[in-house]
Amino acid sequence: MKKNLLSILLLLTNSYIFAQDTVKQQRFNFHFQQTVITQTHPGFGAKYTGNNSLSPNHETATSLTATLFGGARLWKGAEAYFNPEMSGGAGFSSTLGAAGFPNGETFRVGAAEPKIYVARAYLTQRFNWGTEQDTLSDDNNQLAGLQSKRYFSITAGKFGMADFFDTNAFSHDPRTQFMNWSLMSNGAWDYPANTRGYVFGVYMDYHQPSWDLRFAVTMVTNTANGSIWDGKIGKANSQTLEYEKRYTFAGNKQGSFRILGFNNNAKMGNYRLAIAQNPTAPDIESTRNYGRNKFGFGINADQFITKDFGVFAKASYN
């Protein structure tokens, strides 16, 4: 009986150790998402309608995105992620006519047919220290395992700026939260991205148990939200810096706030110069030149009131 009991205990111990090792060392994972959004608006009266206006006629529009998330653990502290994606459909009036567009899953691509492209492809190297650890769950672009509460990481490749910056517990992802463009991220944050919202660059994160300091330097496109990257990286680039502080309120109610600053350097136009050159028909593109920049900042906060209810606030300027 004692021998059998000892064998059972050894088996349970080995199973527990194996389970712990599996959590620590998830080597690969795959996830998939598909989001379909259909919106409609009735006809309305309009005294003026131009090429960039929201159509006053009744409209119904549908968008679709499908993403495959693949992750792999390479060597100590190193992870690689690859996300092929398909998107199709369109927003109201070719995604024009609304300052805060109501569907964050649409893009100004000029074509509604589905297209397949590489959304993300990046490598992350993390340098850990300290003995305190967090347990990470298996998720999109996240391998399950134990991770130090103190680390410095560097990421290089193609990603979305919103993957790392300006997060919010209640308003950040149009697939599961508010769908409006202006609520996904700070409205005045002109983050670098191509037509579909992704960018090539380097991202760094200094992580502590209650705060993070993040920085990224990336490429920019040769036109705003265009599809062609400006190869003159010394003259055309973007820098983003963010500090995040996490805390608990009234015992166990989690909250956080973030301060973000950005600076974009590119071949930009000058509105005042365009008006001075041709007051009746100013052409902003004729004034484009290197050496100009656009900067701004944003404040972003969220606070849980109960387990399932909370509030958030965002304010930004450029």
Image (cartoon, rainbow, N blue to C red):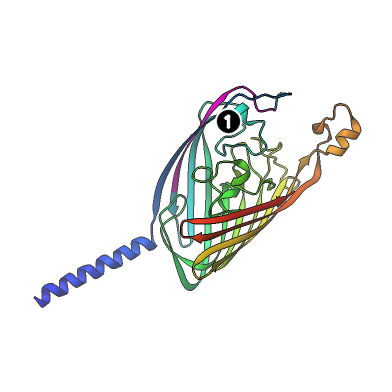
SS at mark 1 in the image: loop
Can I make out residue 138 in this image? yes
Can I make out residue 50 in this image? no
Task: Pinpoint residue 200: horizontal percent, then vertical percent.
Answer: 61, 46
Can you tell which quarter of the image residue 58 is in? top right
Name the residue carrying label 1: 91
Which of 115/122 is in front?
115
Instruction: Check the image and name the residue furthest to the right.
Output: 276
Which of 44/29 is in front?
44
Task: Pinpoint residue 206: horizontal percent, then vertical percent.
Answer: 59, 64
Q: Main secondary structure of the magenta part?
A: strand
Q: Which residues are magenta?
A: 53-70
Residue at 45%, 66% in the rendered image:
134
Three-letter amino acid code at the position of disc 1: Gly
On screen, residue 277 above or below 255: above
Instruction: Check the image and name the residue furthest to the left.
Output: 1
